[in-house]
Image (spheres, rainbow, N blue to C red):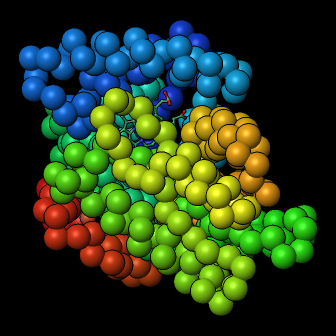
Amino acid sequence: MSDAKARRVAVVLFNLGAPDRPEAIRPFLHNLFADPAILRVPPPIRPLLSALITSRRVKPATENYMLLGGSSPLLAQTEAQAQALSAVLAQRLEDIEARCFIAMRYWHPRAEAVVQDVVRWQPDEVVLLPLYPQYSTTTTGSSLTEWRAMAAKHDLVVRTASVCCWYTQPGYIASFARLLAESLEAARMSLPQGTKLRVLYSAHGLPESIVTAGDPYQMQVEAAAAAMSAAIGLDTFADTDAVVCYQSRATPQKWLEPSTEQALAAAAADRRAVVVVPLAFVSEHSETLVELDIEYRHLADRLGLPGYVRVPTPTLDADFIGGLSDLVCGMLTDGPGVCRDAHSTPCGAAHRDCPQRRRVRA
Ligand SMILES: C=CC1=C(C)c2cc3[nH]c(cc4nc(cc5[nH]c(cc1n2)c(C)c5CCC(=O)O)C(CCC(=O)O)=C4C)c(C)c3C=C
Ligand SMILES: [Fe+2]
Ligand SMILES: [Fe+2]
């Protein structure tokens, strides 16, 4: 007897992409700074400015990636997440065969090749799931724009639903909240009694001008931080407060503040140990393993902070992967209806182009 499932759903997981070997660092950075969603300058000057910024970034980026053995673990981590999500979906969906694909924005596997893999697999529908909890035009927006262009180019004409943002998705919040609570507990056990603590919700930054132009990312970062604080009952701890800050400044413009460096200096002045939550990242890569675990830890030492603990990203945590499966199921034509509204909180009036408001595209 055949066990073929009635319907095929392709789930496409999006992330930034990263160099897989030292020689890939320059072309990866070139792809990133050539993206008009990232570098918002008039077209005539983009190639020149992009080449200039890429050249300046190659050396520090190479130093960072060499600390990780010359490449980023981002793709391997995303592959493991895809496998875990496939396993959960296989259990949850009786008549649907769900297959996960990965599309990276600035390094392989790139959207053009992945669209063709999806076309060959002949799905009945496609669910696009960016692995960015908070929507930004620079990340989710850019990935979905590229996907749509490639889908049109290669005739992927099938019902496609996009998850926009999921910054208060219960599995994501529960997972980070538990990891945060464990880290707070470990910090309290290891530090001298009476040491005050500060939770630093450290998100990847953005140029301020992009937020002013209507990007909802900062609002969503703040809402996610508030949801995590509420989940652990932070306001009931007399010895702990919380601050949102922004890391990874990568261009000369003014970026969102306070920067994570500024927040560390403020914590030092207030004699507080910090517990850092990388809430905009859901797996490990250069921004967590190098910037948070090496650079900012050294800075914290130099500043004389009483303690520095970094909360791990959810990666394969069961609550988190379960949350991703809820998002997928919520987008299916006649799914189990576990999470019908992935947009559990509105993404902001400024987010006019929210794909979730137009869930289904022919
Ligand atoms: C989580 C959301 C992210 C936003 C928003 C974002 C915006 C953004 N990024 C750059 C420039 C760089 N980002 C780099 C690495 C990087 N960025 C994100 C995520 C967001 N970026 C991730 C997950 C990673 C890690 C990739 C990896 O190493 O695995 C880099 C490369 C590393 C480095 O040189 O520091 C650059 C450059 C800009 C300019 C920007 C918004 C305008
Ligand atoms: Fe980035
Ligand atoms: Fe949205």
Depicted 246 relative to depicted 90: above or below: above
Q: Quadrant of residue 330 in the image? A: bottom left
Q: Kindly identify the residue that appears in the image at 54 percent across and 20 percent down.
A: 60
Quadrant including the C terminus = bottom left
**Residue 53, visible in the rendered structure:** yes
Which residue shows up at 68% across the image and 40% down it? 299
89 with respect to 149 (left or right): right
Q: Residue 37 falls in which quadrant of the image?
A: top left
Residue 340 higher or lower than 263, as above or below: below
In this picture, residue 163 sits left or right of residue 240: left
In the picture, measured across the screen, residue 11 lies left or right of residue 199, that is left
Quadrant occupied by the N terminus:
bottom right
Q: Does the rendering let one see residue 91?
A: no
Please name the residue shown 87% across and 65% down the image: 191
Q: Position of residue 126 (x, y in %)?
A: 32, 54
Left or right: 255 in relation to 156 = right
Q: Where is residue 241 shown, x and y percent of the image? A: 61, 75
- Above or below residue 44? Residue 2 is below
Residue at image location 70% in from the left, 45% down from the top: 303
Between residue 40 and residue 297, name the one nearer to us.
Answer: 297
Q: Measuring from the top left, give residue 77's x and y in whole percent.
A: 62, 43
When the figure is inspected, residue 68 is found, relative to residue 289, above or below; the finding is above
- Image quadrant of ligand 3 equals bottom left
